[in-house]
């Protein structure tokens, strides 16, 4: 049993609460740019970034990055960007994204990130609602979206496109801006000042702009470095492949500068294995779906090589080995099996992640106990955490030396969680945002007594570790009055190689059912390994062998719940749910209300 990592108590009104005190002090006049200044002053030649050009990674020192940032920041000032102005940033994850983000802060302005996949309507809403006056885009394709959003050319006053040499244009505009002017702008912000407006995914309606301050990022970064120093050692490296428009990646970006960690960027997920191999990170961050796909790909690759049985046994040993670390020490027999499989299987999996990875950060959804134990069993410590855009990403996290797989950990120092009488998770502390941009009604609704209502349901154990059950608004109530959280069932279903997305339904119905889509990337491999020919998604959705495999996935998921909560029927949709189809948000969360609307007929068929 781990030592208590946070204060945990249950008061007479049944409000379980867990908190951790802040262990350091930070000057209230400081801001995010001071984190970079610190690196330049203390370790000017330390590589903060590494850029991939023609297959070669080239380091960028703290001094070089600072020089590039200040040149762009002066260009923003010279172009007319005033302190406090909102500057939009619409691009793939890249060195340029991070460069512009820091330049905006050095110029005393506020960054408004926009997913590069956003539609014209989404772009128009974010630009208009935030009052964005300047915008960086990456490509001419982004410029086409901007033109569609503003056909009358009444959009942002200043627009720069990376692909058209926009950064050089900005740098040129800053040649007449002196260092004193830039320093005055840089120093204008304090911990309480607005740093960025990040819009929510919009899965339940219009996206809302979350006001995150410099203090949110600075205090949370310093807190994490203090709490998990082994992850951010002097030679730490990480490869960023998640969208920087998302708060999770954005926070890690700032954290790496604070820690002096070398970061590489890639946005090509199809070649991420290649980039991991050449960059060789010491830790990675990903959403659970990435960890699921790595596992499924390894399993099917082994099956194709007639080694599926070996992989299955190796996975079983990895899970049992990890579980034994929590309940005592692994037996001699288990140790021997683990050593054998480390040479045969585990080392190859670690090599696929670059060969140097020792830690991983998982967020954006539940990883599940099985995968948590599997990865720890192969030698990769997964720090699963929990947070929202409104909490600057991490509110709680499992620590490498103090972890409970299956939970999302205790609060980080300076943060607190509480469970309301109805089971909702409430949050307070240095990570919590200050409100929704120009939406006082939504802000007032989200807070009570200084606590932010996360909208998630959870519980806190005797050691202060938080476990998430699901979203409060997503709880299904069957016709028989049974409350069912769809998330645990959906997470278990997605562990199957063939399952792309799963949407559990059954609100006010007689029983629970599910809509399931097939994973188009893994389907061809599965079909080949099972002696079946090529099939389109519609063909596979009606294939008896595919239906049997999905039934096995459903049966497995049902083992984790009571009969009243179990999935009785399912339908395989002959398409994929994507962001382009309107069924997924930019961070790949399912928009349930859209799925329920668009597939109402299929849902009704399940209950006929």
Image (spheres, helix red, strand yellow):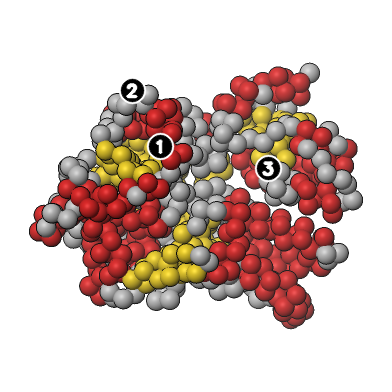
Quarter of the view holding residue 65? bottom left
- Position of residue 42 measured from the top left corner of the image (x, y, whole percent): 25, 75
Camera-side residue of 542 and 421: 542
- Position of residue 168 measured from the top left corner of the image (x, y, whole percent): 29, 53
What residue is shown with label 1?
143
Quarter of the view holding residue 103? bottom left
Q: Secondary structure at mark 2?
A: loop
Q: Is residue 290 above or below residue 232?
A: above
Residue at position x 23%, y 62% in the image? 34
Q: Residue furthest left?
A: 180
- Position of residue 201 measured from the top left corner of the image (x, y, whole percent): 46, 37
Residue at position x 71%, y 36% in the image? 516
Residue at position x 33%, y 33% in the image? 127
What residue is shown with label 3?
500
Camera-side residue of 395 and 16: 395
Q: Give the position of the C terminus as an image quadrant.
A: top right
Q: Give the position of the N terminus as an image quadrant.
A: bottom right
Distance CA(mark 1)–CA(mark 3): 31 Å
In the rendered structure, which disc, 3 or 2, sits on the residue that comes first in sequence? 2
Q: Nearer the viewer, mark 1 or mark 3?
A: 1
Distance CA(mark 2)–CA(mark 1): 14 Å
Estimate how packed mark 3 is, as few (under 14), some (14 to 19) or many (20 or more) residues with alpha carbons within 10 Å.
many
What residue is shown with label 2?
152
Could you tell me if residue 450 is visible in this image?
no
Could you tell me if residue 237 is visible in this image?
yes
| Marks 3,2: beta carbons within 8 A | no
| Marks 2,1: beta carbons within 8 A | no
In the rendered structure, which disc, 2 or 1, sits on the residue that comes first in sequence? 1
In the rendered structure, which disc, 1 or 3, sits on the residue that comes first in sequence? 1
């Amino acid at each position: 049993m781990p030592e208590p990592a946070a204060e945990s108590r249950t008061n007479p009104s049944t409000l379980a609460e867990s908190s951790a005190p802040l262990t350091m002090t930070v000057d209230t006049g400081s801001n995010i740019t001071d984190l970079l200044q610190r690196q330049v002053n203390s370790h000017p030649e330390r590589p903060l970034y590494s850029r991939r050009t023609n297959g070669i990674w080239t380091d960028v020192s703290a001094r070089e990055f600072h020089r590039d940032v200040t040149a762009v920041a002066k260009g923003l000032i010279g172009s007319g960007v005033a302190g406090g102005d909102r500057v939009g940033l619409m691009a793939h994850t890249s060195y340029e994204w991070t460069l512009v983000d820091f330049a905006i802060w050095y110029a005393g302005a506020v960054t408004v990130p926009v997913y590069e996949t956003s539609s014209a309507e989404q772009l128009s809403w974010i630009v208009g609602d935030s009052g964005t006056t300047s915008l960086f885009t990456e490509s001419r394709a982004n410029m086409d979206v901007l033109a569609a959003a503003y056909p009358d050319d009444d959009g942002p006053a200043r627009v720069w496109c990376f692909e058209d040499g926009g950064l050089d244009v900005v740098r040129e505009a800053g040649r007449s801006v002196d260092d004193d002017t830039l320093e005055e702008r840089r120093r204008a912000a304090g911990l309480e000042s607005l740093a960025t407006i990040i819009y929510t995914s919009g899965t339940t309606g219009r996206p809302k702009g979350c006001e995150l301050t410099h203090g949110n990022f600075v205090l949370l970064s310093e807190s994490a470095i203090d709490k998990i120093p082994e992850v951010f050692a002097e030679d730490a490296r990480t490869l960023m492949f998640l969208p920087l428009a998302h708060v999770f990646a954005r926070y890690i970006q700032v954290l790496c500068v604070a820690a002096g960690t070398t970061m590489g960027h890639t946005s090509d997920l199809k070649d991420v294995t290649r980039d991991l191999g050449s960059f060789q990170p010491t830790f990675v961050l990903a959403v659970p779906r990435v960890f699921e796909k790595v596992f499924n790909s390894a399993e099917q690759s082994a099956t194709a090589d007639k080694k599926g049985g070996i992989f299955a046994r190796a996975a079983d040993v990895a899970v049992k080995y990890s579980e034994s670390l929590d309940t005592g020490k692994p037996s001699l027999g288990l140790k021997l099996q683990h050593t054998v499989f480390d040479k045969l299987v585990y080392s190859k999996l670690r090599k696929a992640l670059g060969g140097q990875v020792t830690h991983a950060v998982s967020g954006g959804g539940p990883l599940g106990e099985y995968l948590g134990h599997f990865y720890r069993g192969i030698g990769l410590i997964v720090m699963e955490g929990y947070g929202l855009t409104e909490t600057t990403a991490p509110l709680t996290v499992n620590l490498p030396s103090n972890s409970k797989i299956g939970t999302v950990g205790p609060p980080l120092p300076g943060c607190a969680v509480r469970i309301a009488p109805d089971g909702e998770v409430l949050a307070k502390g240095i990570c919590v945002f200050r409100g929704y941009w120009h939406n006082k009604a939504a802000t007032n609704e989200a807070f009570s007594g200084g606590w932010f209502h996360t909208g998630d349901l959870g519980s806190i154990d005797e050691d202060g570790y938080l476990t998430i059950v699901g979203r409060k608004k997503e709880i299904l109530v069957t016709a028989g009055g049974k409350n069912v959280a769809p998330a645990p069932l959906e997470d278990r279903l997605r562990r199957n190689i063939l399952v792309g997305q799963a949407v559990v339904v059954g609100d006010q119905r007689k029983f629970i059912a599910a809509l399931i889509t097939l994973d188009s990337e893994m389907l061809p491999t599965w079909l080949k390994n099972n002696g079946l020919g090529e099939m389109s998604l519609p063909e596979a959705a009606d294939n008896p062998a595919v239906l049997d495999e999905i039934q096995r996935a459903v049966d497995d998921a049902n083992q984790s719940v009571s009969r009243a909560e179990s999935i009785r029927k399912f339908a395989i949709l002959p398409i994929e749910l994507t962001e382009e189809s309107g069924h997924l948000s930019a961070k790949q969360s399912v928009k349930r209300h859209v799925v329920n609307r668009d597939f109402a007929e299929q849902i009704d068929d399940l209950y006929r």
